[in-house]
Image (tube, rainbow, N blue to C red):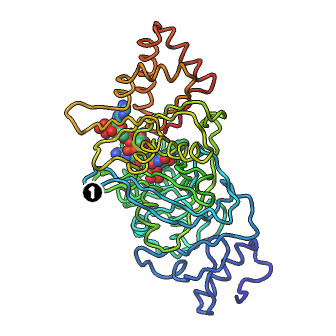
C-alpha cells in the first residue's frame, strides 16, 4: 500500500494504516482500504463506495495466533445456519442460530450465555446519513478510537436506537429554530422523557430539522453499540466446535415506523444476506445457573418461549455425561401447531427416556389462558415429591411476569403439598435458593 501520510503525522499505526488505505483508495492509487479491524478487505466497496443498499459486509477473518477471546476481544464466529423454529401461522419469529467456534479455543458450560456484537440495520443507517446530510464517507472516530467512514461507524460502532443526553445537548446547541432548541434542551434535561420513549436517533433528527450538527460531532455524541446476551442452547460435549442460540426476533410498530431489535434482526435478516458472514462473540459465564454436580439428582426445568434455550443445553449435557437423574420440562408458548420450539427433539427425548416428563402449556389454543404455572399446580403433588427427592428447580425466560408467577406457583405448591403456611413456604423457597437448588436465568 502506498504511504501517503507524512512520517510525523500524529496517528497511531492502526489509524495511519487505515488512513493510508482510505486516501489511496480515494485518490485512485489502486490499493484496497483496510477493514475496521485493520486487515485488508476483499470487498473494497464496503468502505468507500456510494451507498448500495444493503451494503455487503466484508467477512471478518479470525486472527492468528489464537488469543483468548473475551468481551473486549471477541471471536469472529462463522454463521453455520439460521433456521426458523416457528410455523408460518405463528405471531412470532424465533430462530435457531448455530455458530462455528473452530479455532477460537472458546469453551462454555451448559447454563452459560453467549455475548454477541450486532450490526445495525443498513436501511436505518442510510436514513440517518441522509438526515445528517452526510455521504457516509466522512472519516469519524469510533468508540474504540478507530478512524472509519461514518457509514461503518453507524453500522458497527454506535447505538442508533437509543437517544442519550449528550446527543440532545449537541442538537439543542446547533438547532437554528429557537423553539426546536428549547424543546431539545427540555428533553436533554430529562423533562420530557415520555416523548422520548420509543423514539430513536432518526426520529429525533427528523423531528428537529433545523439542527445542523456535523456528522462527526453527532456520531461522537451517540452511545456505543452494546453486545447482546443469549442463553446458550447447546452442550459443548455434544457440539464441541459449535454454539447454538434460540433467538426471539424483536419487531414492532411504534410512532408510525416499523422498529427492529438490533441483534435479533441482525441474525434473522442481515447475516443471511452475506454468505460466510462472521459474528463477533464471547462467552459470558453464568456460574449461578448450573446443572447439579451429581448426575443422579433430578431436575425440573420451566422454560416457556425462548426460555427453552438453556434447557436444550442441559438435556444434551445430561445425555452426553450419562447422568441418570430424572429430567422434567415445562414448556409453553402460544399455539402447539406453530410455536412448539424444538418439538421433534423434545418428543424424541421423551420417547427415549432422556425426559421423564414433558408438560406443555399452549396459552392460546383454548379460551382460557393456560401457562406453565397452570401445569405446575395441576401436577403439584408430583412436583412436590420431586423436590422432596432433592430435585433442582430451574426457570428461564421472561423476567417481568412469568418468573414471578412461577415463583408464586412454587410457594403455592409448598403450601398445598408441603403443608406449610405462608411464612413456612417463604422460608422453604428461600432455603432452595440458598442451597442453589432454585436457579433462574431470566431477562
Ligand atoms: C442473560 C440473558 C439471556 C438472554 N437469552 C436470550 C435468549 O436465549 N433468547 C432471546 O431471544 N433473548 C435472550 N435475551 C434477550 C436478548 O439479550 C436481547 O435483549 C433481545 O434479543 C433483544 O435484543 P435486540 O437487539 O434484538 O433488540 P433491541 O434493539 O435491544 O430492542 C429491544 C427493546 O425494544 C423495545 N421493545 C421490544 N418490543 C417492544 C414492543 N412490542 N413495543 C415497544 N417496545 C418494544 C424494548 O425497549 C426492548 O428493550 C437474553 C438476555 C439476557 C440478559
Ligand atoms: N429485553 C428484551 O429486549 C427482550 C427481547 C425479547 C424477549 N424478551 C423477553 O423474553 C421473553 C420471552 O419471549 P418469548 O416470545 O420467547 O416468550 P413469552 O413472551 O414469554 O411467551 C411464551 C409463553 O408464555 C406465556 N406467558 C405470558 N405471560 C405469562 C405469565 N405471566 N406466566 C407464564 N407464561 C406467560 C405466553 O402466553 P401469551 O402470549 O398468550 O400471553 C406464551 O404462551 C419475553 O416475554 C420478554 O420479556 C426480552
Q: Residue furthest front?
A: 352
Q: Is residue 365 above or below residue 68?
A: above
User: On the image, which quarter does residue 256 sit in?
Assistant: bottom left
Residue underneath mark 1: 88
Q: Nearer the viewer, residue 276 or 161?
A: 276
Percent x, y of residue 310? 52, 44
**Along the line of sight, the residue nearer the viewer: 351 or 279:** 351
The secondary structure type at the circle numbered 1 is: loop
> Can residue 324 be seen by looking at this rendering?
yes
Using the image, determine if residue 177 lies above or below residue 436.
below
Q: Is residue 38 left or right of residue 375?
A: right
Viewer-closest of 295 and 162? 295
Q: Position of residue 304 (x, y in %)?
A: 40, 39
Q: Residues within 10 Å of mark 1 (few under 14, many from 20)?
A: few
Q: Farthest residue in the bottom direction? A: 29
Instruction: Pick the quarter of the image with the N terminus.
Output: bottom right
Q: Is mark 1 within 8 Å of ligand 2?
A: no
Question: With respect to residue 66, does 429 lie above or below?
Answer: above
Q: Residue at x 45, y 52 (%)?
A: 247
Place of residue 346 in the rendered image (x, y in percent of width and height, measured from the top left) = 42, 46
Q: Position of residue 51 (x, y in %)?
A: 44, 77
Residue 409, relative to residue 442: is it above or below?
A: above
Determine the residue positioned at 49% across, 82% down. 49
Inspect this view and state whether residue 194 appears. no
Residue furthest to the right:
8
| Relative to 435, 263 lies left or right | left
397 or 205: which is nearer to us?
Answer: 397
The number of discs equals 1
Identity of the residue drawn at 43% across and 22% down? 382
Amino acid at each position: 500500500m502506498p504511504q501517503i501520510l507524512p512520517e510525523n503525522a500524529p496517528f497511531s499505526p492502526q489509524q495511519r494504516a487505515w488512513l493510508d488505505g482510505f486516501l489511496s483508495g480515494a485518490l485512485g492509487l489502486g490499493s484496497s482500504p483496510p477493514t475496521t479491524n485493520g486487515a485488508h478487505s476483499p470487498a473494497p466497496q464496503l468502505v468507500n463506495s456510494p451507498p448500495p443498499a444493503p451494503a455487503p459486509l466484508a467477512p471478518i477473518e479470525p486472527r492468528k495466533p489464537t488469543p483468548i477471546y473475551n468481551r473486549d476481544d471477541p471471536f469472529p464466529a462463522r454463521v453455520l445456519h439460521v433456521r426458523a423454529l416457528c410455523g408460518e401461522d405463528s405471531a412470532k419469529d424465533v430462530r435457531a442460530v448455530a455458530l462455528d467456534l473452530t479455532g477460537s479455543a472458546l469453551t462454555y458450560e451448559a447454563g452459560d450465555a453467549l455475548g454477541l456484537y450486532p450490526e445495525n440495520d443498513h436501511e436505518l443507517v442510510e436514513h440517518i446519513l441522509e438526515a445528517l446530510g452526510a455521504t457516509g464517507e466522512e472519516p469519524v472516530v469510533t468508540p474504540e478510537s478507530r478512524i472509519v467512514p461514518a457509514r461503518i461507524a453507524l453500522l458497527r460502532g454506535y447505538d442508533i436506537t437509543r437517544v442519550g443526553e449528550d446527543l440532545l445537548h449537541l442538537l439543542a446547541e446547533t438547532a437554528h429554530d429557537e423553539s426546536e432548541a428549547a424543546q431539545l434542551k427540555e428533553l436533554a434535561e430529562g423533562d420530557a422523557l415520555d416523548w422520548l420513549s420509543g423514539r430513536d436517533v432518526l426520529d429525533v433528527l427528523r423531528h428537529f430539522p433545523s439542527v445542523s450538527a456535523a456528522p462527526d460531532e453527532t456520531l461522537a455524541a451517540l452511545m456505543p453499540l452494546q453486545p447482546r446476551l443469549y442463553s446458550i442452547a447447546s452442550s459443548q460435549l455434544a457440539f464441541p466446535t459449535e454454539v447454538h442460540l434460540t433467538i426471539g426476533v424483536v419487531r414492532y410498530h411504534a410512532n408510525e415506523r416499523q422498529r427492529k431489535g438490533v441483534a435479533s434482526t441482525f441474525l434473522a435478516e442481515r447475516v443471511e444476506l452475506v454468505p460466510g458472514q462472521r459474528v463477533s462473540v464471547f462467552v459470558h459465564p453464568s456460574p449461578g445457573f448450573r446443572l447439579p454436580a451429581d448426575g443422579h439428582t433430578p431436575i425440573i426445568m420451566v422454560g416457556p418461549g425462548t426460555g427453552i434455550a438453556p434447557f436444550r443445553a442441559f438435556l444434551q449435557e445430561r445425555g452426553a455425561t450419562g447422568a441418570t437423574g430424572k429430567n422434567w420440562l415445562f414448556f409453553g408458548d402460544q399455539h402447539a401447531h406453530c410455536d412448539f420450539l424444538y418439538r421433534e427433539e423434545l418428543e424424541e427425548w421423551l420417547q427415549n427416556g432422556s425426559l421423564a416428563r414433558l408438560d406443555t402449556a399452549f396459552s392460546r389454543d383454548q379460551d382460557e389462558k393456560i401457562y406453565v404455572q397452570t401445569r405446575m399446580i395441576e401436577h403439584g403433588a408430583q412436583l412436590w415429591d420431586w423436590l422432596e427427592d432433592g430435585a433442582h428447580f430451574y426457570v428461564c425466560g421472561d423476567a417481568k411476569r412469568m418468573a414471578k408467577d412461577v415463583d408464586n406457583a412454587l410457594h403455592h405448591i409448598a403450601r398445598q403439598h408441603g403443608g406449610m403456611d405462608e411464612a413456612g413456604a417463604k422460608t422453604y423457597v428461600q432455603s432452595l435458593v440458598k442451597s442453589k437448588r432454585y436457579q433462574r436465568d431470566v431477562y
